[in-house]
Image (spheres, grey):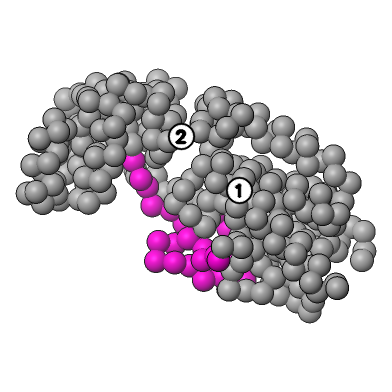
Amino acid sequence: MKDDKEFEVIIIGGSYAGLSAAMALGRSLRKTLVIDSGKPCNRQTPQAHNYITHDGKVPSVISQIARKQVEEYPTVRFYSGLATKGRQVEDGFEIITQNNDSFKAKKIILATGIKDIMPRIKGFSESWGISIIHCPYCHGYEYRNEKTGIFGNGDYGFEFSKMISNWTDDLTLFTNGKSELDDEQTKKLERNNIKIIEKEIASFENEDGHLKNIVFSDGQKHPIKAVYSQVPFVQHSEIPNQLGCELDENGYIKVDMFQKTNIEGLFVCGDNTTFMRSIANAVASGTVAGSMSNKELIDEYF
């Protein structure tokens, strides 16, 4: 194969899932290219948690260590840039970047992540990943026993309020308008001393992403330390759609237990496949994708 343009595997995305897949492939002696735009979804998060041996480290530090280790494998190369187009070609796939560079490979691993869609409320996006958080297993311990809110409504608001009550007794559900909880849900929250505030939220007052108050449209303020929220998302890259990947009803790419998609030779790993958004899960799925793509190559070559 040509040294600079053709590979056995191309990985799109160089964060935790992509680097994990690259390590598995490097250790399998596979000629691999990692295309990375350098914008992980947790780049605003100050600390990563619930990842054994790295608990409490800055996320970028973890990825820097991972990349340095992957770079030790001579068959793995890196390309800094954004992959924008993908198509199937004879004997594999072609990937084209924003700079119009083109690469081919027999197998593709998409570790492209998802893109969160923030509500248009002042202070929300600045606090996302810092004190407006999505996962109690990633960040709940740091906000244990603090004044905590749930930004949500209906079944989500109820279920997440129930879950977060494990971490704090000072919990309020902010529905940002009329509550959509049914009578039974409302009574259960009240029995567990979880308050419900239906006022419209004007802003999340914060200092460098650390919440101070929730400000309502009537000007009143509610002191708060942390808020849990689930925001809608879209796939971060258009390439899964271009290549024909099937999505589930929630917008995640469908994969089997081997991280294989409905497209032969195409694997996917990381946040674009599951609601379990954590470094540990991304690393695990990347290892599977790298190992299984190598197994396919072994079967084909043999």
Q: Is residue 16 above or below residue 291?
A: above
Residue count near mark 2 (Cα–Cα under 10 Å), binned few <14, some 14–19, many ≥20:
some
User: At numbered mark 2, what does the secondary structure look like: helix, strand or loop?
Assistant: helix
Q: Which is nearer the eye, 1 or 55?
A: 55
On whether residue 25 falls in the magenta region, the answer is no
* Residue 300 visible (yes or no): yes
Circle 1 is placed at which residue position?
284
Amino acid at circle 2? Cys
Q: Which is nearer the eye, 115 or 55?
A: 55
Estimate the x, y position of residue 102 in percent, counting from the top left.
79, 63
At x 55% / y 66%, what residue is drawn?
Answer: 256
Q: Which is nearer the eye, 213 or 8?
A: 8
Q: Which residues make up the magenta segment? A: 229-256
On whether residue 231 falls in the magenta region, the answer is yes
Q: CA distance from mark 1 to mark 2?
A: 16 Å
User: N-terminal of the two: label 1 or label 2?
Assistant: 2
Q: Is residue 210 above or below residue 242?
A: above
Name the quarter where the N terminus is drawn.
Answer: bottom right
Amino acid at circle 1? Ala
At x 65% / y 32%, what residue is drawn?
Answer: 62
The residue at the far bottom in this view is 90
Circle 2 is placed at which residue position?
138
Taking the image as shown, residue 179 lies to the left or right of residue 35, namely left
At x 20% / y 50%, what residue is drawn?
Answer: 154
Is the Cβ of the residue at disc 1 closer than 8 Å to that at disc 2? no
Residue 117: assigned label: none
User: At numbered mark 1, what does the secondary structure look like: helix, strand or loop?
Assistant: helix
